Image (cartoon, rainbow, N blue to C red):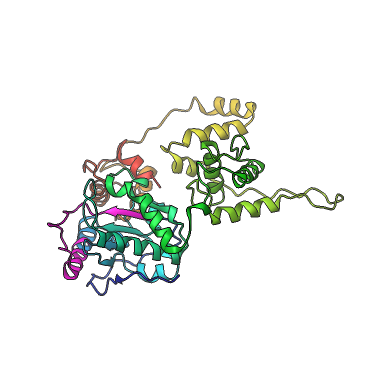
Amino acid sequence: MPFTASVISAKEWGARPPKSWPAETRPQFIVIHHTASPNPPNDVSRGTLAGAKTFARSVQKAHMDGFGWADSGHNFLNTTGGFVLEGRQGTLNAIKRGRCVRSAHAGSDKGNESPGIENEGTFTTYQMNAQQWNSLVDLCASICSTTNINPDNIRGHRDFSPTQCPGDWLYNQLPRLRREVRQRLGTSDDEILREGSTGPKVRELQQILKAQGFNPGPVDGIFGSGTTDAVISFQKFHGLASDGLVGSSTWKVLERVSKSQEKPTDSSSSAPTPSPISAIALLDSYKYYRGLPHQLQAIEWLQGKLSKATLEEFSQRWRTQPSQPFLPLQEGSIGPEVKQLQQLLKKQGFDSGSTDGVFGAKTKAAVIAFQRAKGMEADGIVGAVTWPALNLA
């Protein structure tokens, strides 16, 4: 199915040239937002085409001049009149080719690699009108079709960052949105295994997971929380979208790894030599998972794989080393942690100046812009609240 949604390009609505052109990405999600602006009859665009273009220009100005971003932070804007406009320039062309461009809407690297759709309005309790809803469904269906994104990977902004976006009402409508997108694409819920599924296909899934070292619990044909955890671990290990849903993409990898470990029919053949494990930077992995609910499970799993002698040696060697806490970071701070802060800010679209490990005025301005974007106290100090938010990816 080709891209059929009607989208007004950035050039057509009069966008300013971007400060820099974004890199292309391989999207995994569609991230749903609301603009937190007034609802009808006080909506900014007034439901008109001219108003939609004016709104797009004002959002771009706020993102570029206020937040210091290279361009509009989002990829698409869906207004109250059902007009869809391209946001970050290069998005529309990339999406039609099955890609996306790096943006700044989600507050995390993973989210920013996927298209973000801003929906005009505040949807805490207010309900979107039918015209705007239909344009959202059309856009999501076209994106899923051209990029092969599973409709179950239509997510809310709050799934990627600590925020109330896209509002409680719209967030609670995401199951309906996924269902209607699947209907447009001609697919069915029955094609995807998820928590609550039962039957022989689930039992087969559990058998493959167990054989691969991902413990799903009892092999009983019941997709429970243990199977969900095992699926997520399997997906993370193989670089898949870690949503706990077993659709066509996950099944292909499951079948491939299962076939690769079948015993050879020639009994004289020697056992295959295990392939070398890819090098993983443990410190980077810790930073990635820090603060997430499954961090403790990951550490416990790793601990279970190490011998008692190794753990005792580690404890004796490192437990007496002095701790060097580095928070809070603020103007005047220097060192590798400041450099890491600057890198995180830049990845999320906030210009912190030179990545030199020196917390100067430009880095402070970028921190303040980030805090404002996340609804935090904008004091320019990176403490126990701002640092975890920056590290969510």
Residue 264 percent across, percent down from the top left: 79, 52
Residue 37 placement (x, y as % from top left): 18, 54
- Seen at 66% across and 49% down, the residue is 276
Q: Along the line of sight, which residue is nearer the eye, 368 or 291?
A: 291
Q: Is residue 366 above or below residue 184?
A: above
Residue 134 quadrant: bottom left
Q: How many marks?
A: 0
The residue depicted at 56 percent of the width and 34 percent of the height is 301
Residue drawn at 20 percent across, 62 percent down: 61
Q: Is residue 89 covered in magenta?
A: no
State whether residue 157 appears in this view: yes
Residue 355 as seen in the image, left or right of residue 185: left
Q: Residue furthest right?
A: 268
Q: In the image as oriented, which residue stretches furthest toward the left?
A: 42
When asked about the image quadrant of residue 199, the answer is: top right
On the image, the x and y values in percent for residue 238 come to 56, 51
The stretch drawn in magenta includes residue 37:
yes
- In this rendered view, identify the residue nearer to me: 331 or 288: 288
- Tell me which segment is drawn in magenta: 30-59
Q: Position of residue 8 (x, y in %)?
A: 28, 71
